[in-house]
Amino acid sequence: MNASSSLTATFEELLVSCSFAPVNQHPYYTIGAQQEGIWSLHISVIEQESDELLIKVLPYLKQKAVSFAIPVTKELIPLIISGRYGNANIGRIINVYPSSDTVAASLAMELAALTLQTNGPSVTNGFHLGGGLYAVHQDGANGILPGTIPWPFTNIPRPPSQLSNRIGTYLIAEILKNDPKGRVIKAIRRKTVLDTKIVIVKEGKRFMCTDAEGRDMRTRLQWQQRIGTMLKNKVIMPEIYEYFEKDGDAFLAMEFIDGSTFRKFVLQPFEKGSWIDFPPPVHLAAIDKLLEIVGIAETIHGEGLVHRDLSTMNFLIRKGKLCLLDMELAYYMKEDYPNPPFGVGSEGYMSPEQRRGDIPTFKEDIYAIGAIMQKMFTGVDPYRLFSAEYAEMREKMIFFVHDEALATLVAGCLNIDPGARPSLNIVKETLESARARLAQGLIVNPALDDINEGRLRSIILQGIDSLARQFGATGQWFSRDQEQTNLAPTEEGEYKVYLNFHQGAAGIMYMLCRAASAGFDISGCRPIIDANWQDIADYYLNQPEAISPGLGQGLAGVALTIATAHNTQLLPTGWPVQDTLAKCFTMVNASPGIYDGQAGQGVAAIAVAGVLPGVTALLPHLVNTILPMQTPKGEWLFQMPGEEQTISHAGFMAGTAGITYFLLCCYGVTKEDAVKTAAVKALKYLQSTVQVKDGKRIIDKQEAPVDIFYGLGGIALTFIKAYEILQDPIYKQFAEAILNALPARYLMNNLTTSVGITGIGEVYLEAHRVFQDDAWRKRAAFIAKALTYMALDNGAGGKFWLTDNPRVTTADLMVGNAGIIHFLLRYLHPGKFGFPMLTA
C-alpha cells in the first residue's frame, strides 16, 4: 500500500479528460501495466514546460494504446528531477512502456519528433534518442549498453559498450561525489610531461535546478567562477582554472585541496565524550576554528557577498587552515545578484528566511555560524535541535555545553528573527572571551543525574499524540519501503504500510500497549490500532503459510504484539488469543538468526509462553536444528542473499550474539546441559573476537559499530543475559568492559533503536536491571535528557524526532519515533518493561 500525495492539484483531471483510468502509485499515476525486461521510453521535461508537453503527448499515447506513467502533480516534477524520489527516477516524467522492441522503435521516432523542443535533464541510465526522449533497458547502465542487448533504434547510433574516462582534456581518476545535480570528480590535467596536476572538476548537469528564470546548474557554476575571481587572494579557497561545457553539461575545473574535512574535525572528539568532557586543548582548537570561520565571514561580507551555505560540510582543513568551498549559492548585495537567489543551503544550517526565499542579508550567515557552533558544541546535527523559541534553544544549549555565555550566543545566532541575531563582531568577542575561560579550564562538569519526571511524562504524552495526529493522520502508519535500502541522503523514497514488528504497525502497537499499562492515554491512537488488528487478522493470520515466520518482519513479531496486548487487555473483544498465537508458530524458518530466523522464533515463543504455554514445545526442534550448525570455534555461519559462500558475523540481529542470546533464554527455561554447553562455547568465541581496550572497539579485527543490531551494543546485551542466566561474574565484567568502551556521555547522529543511540540507552537500562548498578541508569539518563531536547514541535501540540533523516521520519518502533518513546517509557518505569522485541 503506497502513501498518497499530500498535494491536491493533480493531473487526474487531465488524464480523465483523455478517457484514461489512472491508478495512483505515488509519485506517479499509472495507466496500463508496466512491461518488465524490455525497453522503456522516458521523456524528460522541466516543470515550466510540462503542461504544454502533456497536452501534446497524451492524445498520442491514447491513440497508440500504450501503457505509461506521469507524476501525480505538477509540483512533484522538480522533486522527481532532483532525485528526491530516487536517483533512478531522475528525468523520468513521462514514462512509456512499449510491449516489444518493435513497438519501442516505432514510438521512439514519433516521440522524439514530438519532444524536439523539450528541455529536461538527462534520464538516469538512459540513452538519448533525440528531443526530450530517452530509452532505458534493465541491463544498461551509466551510458553503457552491453553488446549482447539488441539495439532496436536503428536511426540512432548504438551507445558505446564502455564509457570514456575523459571529460574534455581531463582524465577521470575518481568520482568523489555522485550527486543528482552533477558529479564531483577528481581528475588529472596534463598539458605537458612537466605540467601535470590533480584537479577537481565539478559538474553541473543541464536543466538541473531549473528555476522560473530559466537558470540551471550551468548558471550556478558560471557564477561560482566569477566569485572565485572576486575572492582570489582574499579567502583561502580552491583556485578556479576554467569553465567549459560538454554535451550540454557544465564543468568547473579547480584546484585540488589535499586536506581533511572540517566535519571530521568537529565530530572526532565526540567519540570520547561530550563537550563538557573535552580537555582544554580540544576546547581551544574548536574555538580557534570558529573564530577562523568568523574571520572568513567578515572578509566575504566586506566584499558584499552573503555565502548562504556555510556548514561543517563546506570547509576543508589544509595545513591547519580552513579552506572555504561551494560558493555557488552566494548572493552579491552590491549588484542584487542573483535575484531571486539560487536555491537554499544545507538542512539545519539555512535560516528560516532563506527557506522562505527572502532577499538575502548577512544575517543568513550569522544563523549558519550559529548552527556550526551548535554542531561543534553538541556533535548533533542542527536540524535535530531546532526551536523557534529563543528561551527553549538557550535551555537546550545549556544542557549540552554548561556555559551560559556560549549557550546564549548560539541561541541568539539561531533566533528566527534576523534582527535579533548578534553581529559578527559580537560573535567574535563572545568566542574570544570563552576561549580565555576555557584556557584556564573554567568549565562546569556536572554529575550525571536523573531527568525531571514531569518533563519526561509530558514528552512521552506529546510523542504519543504525534503518533495519532501526525504520523497517523491518514488512519495508517507509513514506513519506508523496505525494498529501498540503499537510498542516497537526498532521496526521499517510497512509503508503505507494513504490519510487522521491526518496521511496521505491530511494533508501534506493542509500544502503545506498554504505554497504556503505565497509565498513559493512548485513546487518540485507538482507531488506528483497531484498524491494524483487522489488517493483521486478514493479512497475517488468515494466510500464515505465506508470511515470514521471523521476529523482525514476520509472525513471531506479531505474536509478541498479540501477547503484549492480551497482557494489557487491549486486544479486540472476542479475539481468539491462543488460536491466533498458535498460527504465528506453524512455520519454522531455515535461517538460525534472531532477526528473521529460528533464534528469533524461539525468543518470541519463550516471551509469549505465559499466554500460550504449549508453544515451548517448539524449543527442542529449534535447538536440535541450531546446535549442529555451530562451528568448532563456537560461531554460526550465515549465507548472504544471492551469494553461495557463508560468512561469520558476531553481531546480534544477524549473527552469533543473537543466537547465543536465544540459547541462554532457552537454557533458562529447559535447563538442558547441551544448550548451556553450546551457549558457553559461543560466549567464549565472542570474547575472543571482541576487543575493547586502549580506546579501540574491535570485532573480528575490524573497527566495530556500537549499535545493537550489528555492533557492540548487541554483544553487550548477550553478555548481560549470560550473567543473568548463568550468574558467572566473568560475563558481567565482559559486558561492562564493552559498555565502558563508550564514554559516559555518548550520543550519535542516528536516534533509532536498531542502529542508533536509543538502542544504546535500552542496553544501559538492561544493564541496570540485571546488575542493579545505578551507574548504568545514569548513563541512560543522559541519553534520555538529550532525546527530550531533540524532540521537535509539530505545530499541533505534539513532539516528534528526526531519527535518521533530515527531512522525514516514521512512527516505527525499531527505526522511528515509537522506539524513542519506548525507551523514555522504560526509563520512567525501571523494571516494569523488558527489552523491546525480546520480551512481551
Image (tube, grey):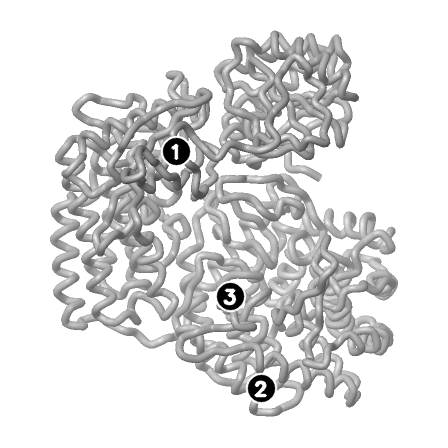
The three-letter code of the residue at mark 2 reads Tyr
User: 176 left or right of 3?
Assistant: left
Q: Secondary structure at mark 3?
A: loop
Name the residue tied to disc 1. 170
User: 382 left or right of 587?
Assistant: left
* Quadrant of the frame with the C terminus: bottom right
The three-letter code of the residue at mark 3 reads Pro
Give the answer, above or below, for where 297 lies relative to 689: above
Q: Earlier in the sequence, mark 2 or mark 3?
A: 3
* Dot 2 crowding, Cα within 10 Å, few <14, some 14–19, many 20+: many
Give the answer, above or below, for where 97 lies relative to 295: above
- Give how far across and how far down residue 62 sits, in percent: 73, 11
Give me the C-alpha separation between circle 2 and circle 3.
21 Å
Give the answer, above or below, for where 228 lies relative to 440: above
Give me the C-alpha separation between circle 1 and circle 2.
58 Å
Q: Nearer the viewer, residue 54 or 506?
A: 54
Q: Which mark is residue 705?
A: 3
Give the answer, above or below, for where 379 lies relative to 133: below
Q: Earlier in the sequence, mark 1 or mark 2?
A: 1
